[in-house]
Amino acid sequence: MKRIIYWLFAGTKGGPTRAQIVKAIKERPRNANQLSEDLGFDYKTIKHHIKMLLDNKLIVATGEKYAKLYFLSDDFEKNYHIFEEIWERFGKK
């Protein structure tokens, strides 16, 4: 899990965007449109990063189509401290 978190947030160009998405979802579950509006990113950008987070099992979805809400996965919740450590070290450049 630590390697995946490191790669997604500190090892790639899109890490800061994904970090903002994760922080927003941790605050409260949201759908892609809400994330787009709340974070000020294009909807397609949000969908791209959501797909990466889903593919790597850091978030899960509930619902269908546009009403899909995203939550942090149980495994990521348990390891959220790793994200915080990595983000503190590498994310605030």
Image (cartoon, rainbow, N blue to C red):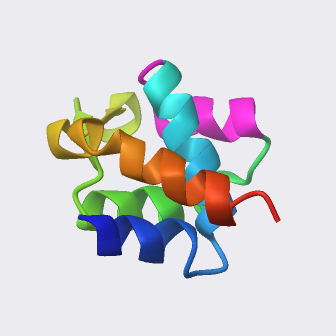
Name the main secondary structure of what is drawn in magenta.
helix
Relative to 44, does residue 26 appear above or below in the rendering? above
Q: Nearer the viewer, residue 73 or 91?
A: 91
Q: Where does the image place residue 6, in percent across and percent down from the top left?
A: 44, 71
Q: Residue at x 60, y 67 (%)?
A: 15
Q: Which residues are magenta?
A: 28-39
Q: Quadrant of residue 14?
A: bottom right
Residue placed at 32% from the left, 71% from the top? Answer: 4
Of all residues, the one furthest to the top in this rendering is: 28
Near-viewer residue (9 or 54): 9
In the rendered image, residue 90 lying in the magenta stretch gets the answer no
| Left or right for 59, reference 23 | left
Question: Is residue 90 visible to us here?
Answer: yes
Residue 92: x and y in percent read 77, 57
Instruction: Say whether residue 17 is visible.
Output: no
Residue 2: x and y in percent read 31, 66
- Image check: 33 left or right of 80? right
Q: Is residue 35 magenta?
A: yes
Q: Tell me the residue at 71%/29% (across/down).
A: 38
Pick the front one: 17 or 69: 17
Image-based side of 25 in relation to 10, left or right: left
Q: Quadrant of the C terminus?
A: bottom right
Looking at the image, how many numbered discs can be counted on the residues?
A: 0
User: Residue shown at 39%/42% (left/top)?
Assistant: 81
Residue 76 higher or lower than 44, as above or below: above
Q: State whether residue 76 is above or below residue 33.
A: below
Q: Quadrant of residue 40?
A: top right
Q: Nearer the viewer, residue 43 or 1?
A: 1
Q: Quadrant of the N terminus?
A: bottom left
